[in-house]
């Protein structure tokens, strides 16, 4: 597929030509300004520079519509392309409550080793990356959770024509507990992304996320697009004694959007989105009609926002429920902003929408606020701080809800281009109200759980130019 699209993309590279002459004061078809090609790192190829990709006039495609989203990387850290990268990470982690118990907590220490490899290639019409990390995690207390972990990530972007772009991305992971591959792969951003506003007890999780997004810059000030995504999460082999019952979740999403330039680099428009959230025992279908606005101020500042009505249709119940919430209208909205320079990156946001229940609650009305700060202290040293708070109100197991507050800090040390050290601490406090018990016949439970984590990772990485 990659080879075929590369040939197709190369064939779409138009020869240089002079711009059409415009007659003064004329208003016929030949005098109209042709639409600017979608060549920037915003609506077009996600690149780091070049004469074709320095425009900041095209819109940032929000993650809600299938875009990549805001990166925490510094401008000085933007990776160069056409490289083969590889390495190995060796780490250790301490968790004082891996089962998320309210009383009788038991701690766990784990050691892990993760080799990884990644390829990054780019041409004038295409860019794609492929990364894999796999290794072994050994738990000192929960030995039945000892197993290999795998993460495979593919992200590709194609210039199908001067005005049409296509993005295809896939992420697959099979993990147990803490996973730090160190190869830059992660969950694919896009519509219907997995809910990260709650945490689950120690268990084996198999998940995949697929995103396809295309946009067509059909006029100077207008752009249309569509995106689709599918997220699948399966839980197995839960550690004994956990208080939460885990449920498999599948979320399929599709959206169509139109954006119009309001002024400068400010684009606004509308989007229709459909989500189908399926879980053990039922499903929730969500229709959303959203007003979207995105503002990109050069490479440093990005602002996006959305607001509009949502209609949810609930069928069946997640395990532990008695009766689902009836179909209802609600308001969805959110905003996110990011700023970065050569040595600092900052991002923050708020959202209110219907989402999956993270493997616990089926479908939920999620409210989340988050903030991230990352700063290079001295050459070779960087520190990061992140905080978040999320509330998950169940739609299919009322009146169940889970509130999570998290905070973490990490310190990074790079020695040359090959050696790196990363250490950090995080604290999670999760309040759980009326949550289903460990068996279908168990009554709903209400309890609080807190967790502290400390981790240290030592990495060795290498890079080889591919000569392209």
Image (cartoon, rainbow, N blue to C red):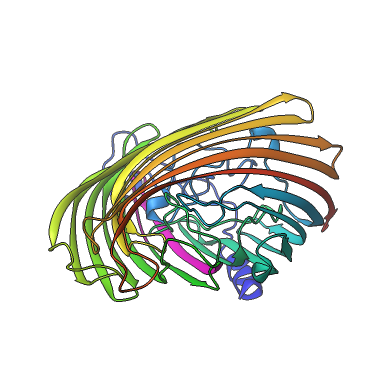
Q: Which residue is drawn at 58% across and 39% down?
A: 426
- Quadrant where the C terminus sits is bottom right
On screen, residue 157 above or below 71: below
Residue 215 is a magenta residue: yes
Residue 362 location (% of width, % of height): 32, 65
> Extreme top residue here?
378
Residue toward you, 121 or 368: 368
Q: Residue at x 64, y 66 (%)?
A: 152
Residue 124 location (% of width, % of height): 64, 55
Residue 308 location (% of width, % of height): 20, 47
Residue 408 location (% of width, % of height): 57, 36
Magenta stretch, residue numbers: 204-226
Q: Can residue 304 be seen in this view?
A: no
Residue toward you, 378 or 159: 378
Q: In which quarter of the image is residue 423?
A: top right
Residue toward you, 25 or 204: 204
Q: Quadrant of residue 31?
A: top left
Residue 160 is a magenta residue: no
User: Is residue 86 left or right of 152 when viewed as pictured?
Assistant: right
Residue toward you, 101 or 209: 101
Q: Is residue 459 visible?
A: yes
Q: In which quarter of the image is residue 304?
A: top left
Q: Which residue is drawn at 73% across and 36% down?
A: 412
- Quadrant where the N terminus sits is bottom right
User: Is residue 21 left or right of 300 when viewed as pictured?
Assistant: left
Q: How many labels does the image show?
A: 0
Majority SS type along the magenta span: strand
């Amino acid at each position: 597929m990659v080879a075929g699209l590369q040939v197709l993309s190369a064939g779409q590279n138009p020869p240089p030509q002079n711009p059409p002459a415009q007659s003064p004061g004329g208003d016929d078809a030949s005098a109209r300004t042709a639409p600017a090609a979608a060549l920037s790192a915003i609506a077009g190829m996600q690149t780091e520079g070049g004469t074709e990709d320095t425009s900041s006039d095209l819109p940032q495609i929000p993650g809600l519509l299938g875009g990549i989203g805001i990166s925490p990387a510094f401008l000085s850290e933007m990776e160069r392309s056409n490289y083969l990268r590889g390495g190995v990470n060796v780490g250790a982690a301490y968790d004082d409550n891996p089962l998320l118990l309210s009383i009788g907590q038991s701690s766990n220490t784990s050691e892990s080793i993760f080799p990884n490899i990644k390829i990054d290639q780019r041409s004038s019409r295409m860019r794609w990356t492929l990364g894999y990390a796999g290794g072994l995690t050994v738990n000192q207390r929960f030995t039945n959770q000892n197993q290999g972990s795998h993460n495979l990530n593919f992200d590709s972007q194609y210039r199908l024509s001067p005005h049409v772009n296509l993005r295809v991305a896939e992420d697959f992971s099979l993990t147990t507990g803490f996973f730090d591959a160190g190869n830059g792969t992660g969950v694919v951003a896009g519509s219907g992304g997995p809910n990260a506003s709650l945490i689950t007890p120690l268990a084996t999780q198999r998940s995949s996320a697929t995103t396809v997004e295309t946009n067509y810059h059909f006029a100077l000030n207008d752009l249309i697009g569509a995106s689709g995504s599918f997220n699948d999460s399966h839980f197995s082999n839960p550690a004994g004694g956990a208080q939460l019952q885990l449920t498999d979740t599948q979320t399929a999403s599709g959206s169509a959007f139109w954006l119009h330039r309001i002024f400068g680099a400010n684009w606004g428009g509308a989007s229709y989105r459909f989500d189908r959230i399926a879980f053990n025992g039922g499903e929730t279908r969500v229709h959303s009609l959203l007003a979207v606005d995105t503002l990109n101020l050069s490479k440093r500042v990005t602002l996006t926002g959305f607001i509009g009505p949502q209609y949810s249709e609930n069928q069946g119940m997640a395990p532990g429920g008695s009766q689902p919430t009836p179909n209802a209208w609600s308001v969805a909205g959110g905003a996110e902003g990011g700023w970065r320079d050569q040595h600092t990156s900052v991002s923050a946001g708020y959202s209110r929408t219907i989402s999956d229940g993270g493997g616990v609650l089926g479908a939920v009305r999620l409210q989340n606020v988050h903030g991230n700060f990352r700063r290079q202290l001295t050459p070779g040293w960087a520190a990061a701080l992140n905080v978040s708070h999320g509330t998950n109100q169940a739609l299919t197991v009322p009146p169940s809800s889970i509130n999570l507050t998290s905070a973490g800090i990490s310190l990074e040390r790079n020695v040359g281009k090959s050696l790196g050290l990363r250490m950090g601490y995080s604290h999670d406090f999760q309040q759980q109200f009326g949550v289903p018990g460990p068996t279908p016949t168990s009554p709903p439970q209400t309890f609080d759980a807190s967790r502290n984590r400390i981790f240290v990772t030592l990495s060795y990485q290498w890079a080889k130019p591919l000569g392209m």
